[in-house]
Amino acid sequence: MIIRKIKEIVTGEHAIDGAGVNLVRVIGRPNVYSFDPFLMMDAFDSIDPDDYTKGFPWHPHRGIETITYLIKGDIEHGDSLGNKGRILDGQCQWMTAGSGIIHQEMPQASERMLGVQLWLNIPAKDKMTDPAYRDILSEMIPKIEDDASRVGILSGNYKDTDGAICGDYVKLRFLDVDIKPNREWAIDTQSDKTLYIYIIEGSGIFDEEKGLVESKRAILFEQGDQLIVNASKDGIRFLLFEGSPLKEPIAWGGPIVMNTQEELTQAFKDLDEGNFIK
């Protein structure tokens, strides 16, 4: 049994995106290959509506999946296919952009906006798949609780329980893990998969050599068969992401991620000529 050690700790950087949304870009272009198949993750945590209500007006995506999970908040959304709705407390939206979609995400004023948006890459053979939405309501997310932890299973499997989804193109394990103060938690992992966590609140020890890691950090782990977490006296809550790396070239232009520059150029040509939606 090989215990996963910390490979990299990332704090990210403050960014302003959309029409003026303040966020933390936790992972992105600088570390995209080391986090493969995860392209980008933005984190939101604010009690000031001015930080986020300008939103993300109409914009295109192709070649990726976007996974938006709100612990707290309210986001209205709509798209070029006629889908529309809201993401509320404890809910997740899994959008497959595939061959192309144009959508908007408009956060509404709330007591607290707390959550993340993850960009998950799509393999080259599936880049131009049909766009799709999956709305995952809180009650659709299995929760497993014991004397040490409470784990929400958004995607994948935990303790022989399947989550709300598994992922059609990248089999993703996505867990919301809340560990009580001074308790230990462990999970078996597949050694060849990329595994990282993002700490929402609290702190913990993941690797004795690295010591205590505080909140608002992403931790990328080395390969191994098991992850062990020791929560601090304040407990810890984190999101866990595990998926197989694609090991494919990445051609990234704004909201579009393809495999070659030619494909990227074609995508923007399609936008200019009104042929983006297939």
Image (cartoon, rainbow, N blue to C red):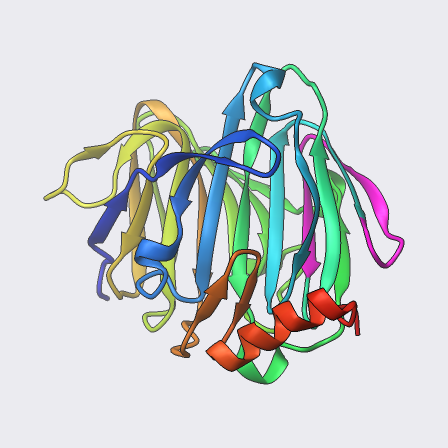
Spot occupied by residue 111 in the image (x, y as percentages of width and height): 64, 14
Q: Quadrant of residue 32?
A: bottom left
Q: Residue at x 54, y 73 (%)?
A: 264
Location of the C terminus by quadrant is bottom right
Extreme residue toward the bottom, this view: 125
Residue farthest toward the front in the current orientation of the protein: 273
The answer to whether one can see residue 159 in this image is: no
What residue is drawn where x is 34% and y is 40%? 12
| Residue lying at the far right of the rendered structure | 82
Q: Quadrant of the N terminus?
A: bottom left
Question: Residue 172 vs residue 61: left or right?
Answer: left
Q: At which x and y percent is residue 2?
A: 22, 65
**Is residue 27 depicted above or below 116 in this figure?**
below
Which quarter of the picture shows residue 231?
top left
Residue at 40%, 52% in the rendered image = 28
Percent coordinates x, y for residue 20 in the rendering? 57, 30
- In this view, the residue in front, 95 or 231, is 95
Above or below residue 256? Residue 107 is above
**Range of the magenta residues?**
79-96
* Image quadrant in which you'd find residue 60: bottom right
